[in-house]
Image: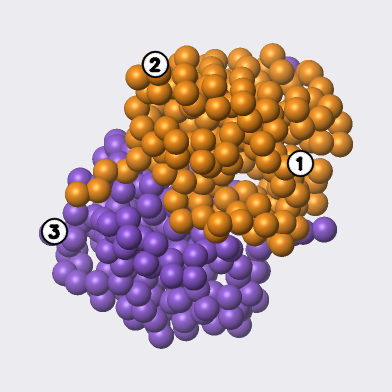
Chain colours: A purple, B orange
């Protein structure tokens, strides 16, 4: 019996995602507009490659360098944990080999405001700043549930020392969400009987 | 440069955790007391093995069989995502190869009420029931932050169709949290400057 118990779990990122990081890691994202643009580009590529319509990336905002990228892999990886922010934070911590990014000048850029799970993950990651593009209303407008978030989610992060900037390139991110629906993308909230 | 970009991520569960599952998977947990006892036993073993003081497991409540186990691996795996519930849900979905546990009769048992991240992860996992032992006040009492959860987190899950049973074997779970502190366990909330 015990032979069947997995001792480990492997998350494999799609080749296009690794290639994207390789192409972008030498570039410099000087400001939040440039960082949001990367997250939105990841959301667009995720749609084109059969994933959910969300992208995220972690940057060193002191020098503008890209540290990690993520996109929504719920369906491709068959696991509901893999929202874009979770993937980006996982690989940021993995590449630095630390569970607390707190002392570092790091920004999480995401194509859409975090859901309740990613809100918590952002907080526990220690990331210093969050920059988001589309709003949770934009996500809800196409049928995604953001969960029981505090009404003032940004305030909840700010109270705990995280800087938050919202609606950076919102229209561009919204367009990708709407393209996902228009091209028949699946709204994969958990099924309830 | 691109050679340095990790294409995958591997989470390795400690040997004792895999051995625990092997020992318990043939047993039947008939009721929530038995399921909470397994989660608490995992929290105790996690402390003994240098991890955080939290354990969780997923059971099929139709037949009482154990499906997956988890414990807090934030420090051992160097990643803030790996709360006990996240590990248990990850392996439950991995073993069933599905991102939505919704149609199945599955219960997540946890030694302590979920934090805001795990609250969201529970919801997105599709798990039908949550059974918790210690309360978030018990976790906060030893210095852990539970994050910006809704005041009525259980109500927020119930509204979305998840059954919630709290304070099952709370005293036993509390004892483990207190033992963690008494034996010098680290309270590893993210550092804020």
Q: Is residue A18 above or below residue B181?
A: below
Label 1 to label 3: alpha-carbon separation: 46 Å
Which of the image's four quarters has the C terminus of chain A?
bottom right
Label 2 to label 3: alpha-carbon separation: 39 Å
Dot in front, 2 or 3: 2
| Whether labels 1 and 3 share one chain | no
Q: Is residue B133 above or below residue B81?
A: above
Which of the image's four quarters has the N terminus of chain A?
top right
Q: Position of residue A122 (x, y in %)?
A: 39, 54
Q: Secondary structure at mark 2?
A: loop
Q: For residue B183, which numbered disc appears in the image?
A: 2
- The chain holding disc 2 is B
CB under 8 Å between discs 2 and 3:
no
Q: For residue B106, which numbered disc appears in the image?
A: 1
In-image side of B58 versus B136 (left or right): right
In-image side of B1 versus A116 (left or right): left
In-image side of A163 versus B144 (left or right): left
- What's the residue at 61%, 23% (across, down)? B172
Q: Position of residue B170 (x, y in %)?
A: 63, 30
Q: Is residue B136 above or below residue A34?
A: above
**Is residue A110 something that shows in the picture?**
no
- What's the residue at 79%, 35% (across, down)? B60
Q: Secondary structure at mark 3?
A: loop
Check the image and name the residue furthest to the right: B62
């Amino acid at each position: 019996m015990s032979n069947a118990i997995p001792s480990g779990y492997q998350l494999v990122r799609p080749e296009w995602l690794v290639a994207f990081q390789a192409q972008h890691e030498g570039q410099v994202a000087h400001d939040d507009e440039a960082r949001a643009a990367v997250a939105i580009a990841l959301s667009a590529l995720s749609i084109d490659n059969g994933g959910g319509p969300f992208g995220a990336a972690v940057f060193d905002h002191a020098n503008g360098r890209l540290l990690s990228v993520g996109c929504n892999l719920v369906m491709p990886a068959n696991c509901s944990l893999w929202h874009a922010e979770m993937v980006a934070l996982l690989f940021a911590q993995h590449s630095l080999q630390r569970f607390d990014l707190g002392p570092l000048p790091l920004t999480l850029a995401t194509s859409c405001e975090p859901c309740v799970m990613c809100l918590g993950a952002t907080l526990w990651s220690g990331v210093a700043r969050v920059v988001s593009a589309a709003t949770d209303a934009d996500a809800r407008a196409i049928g995604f549930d953001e969960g029981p978030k505090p009404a003032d989610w940004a305030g909840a992060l700010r109270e705990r020392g995280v800087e938050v900037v919202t609606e950076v390139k919102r229209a561009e991110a919204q367009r990708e969400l709407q393209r996902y629906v228009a091209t028949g993308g699946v709204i994969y909230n958990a099924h309830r009987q």
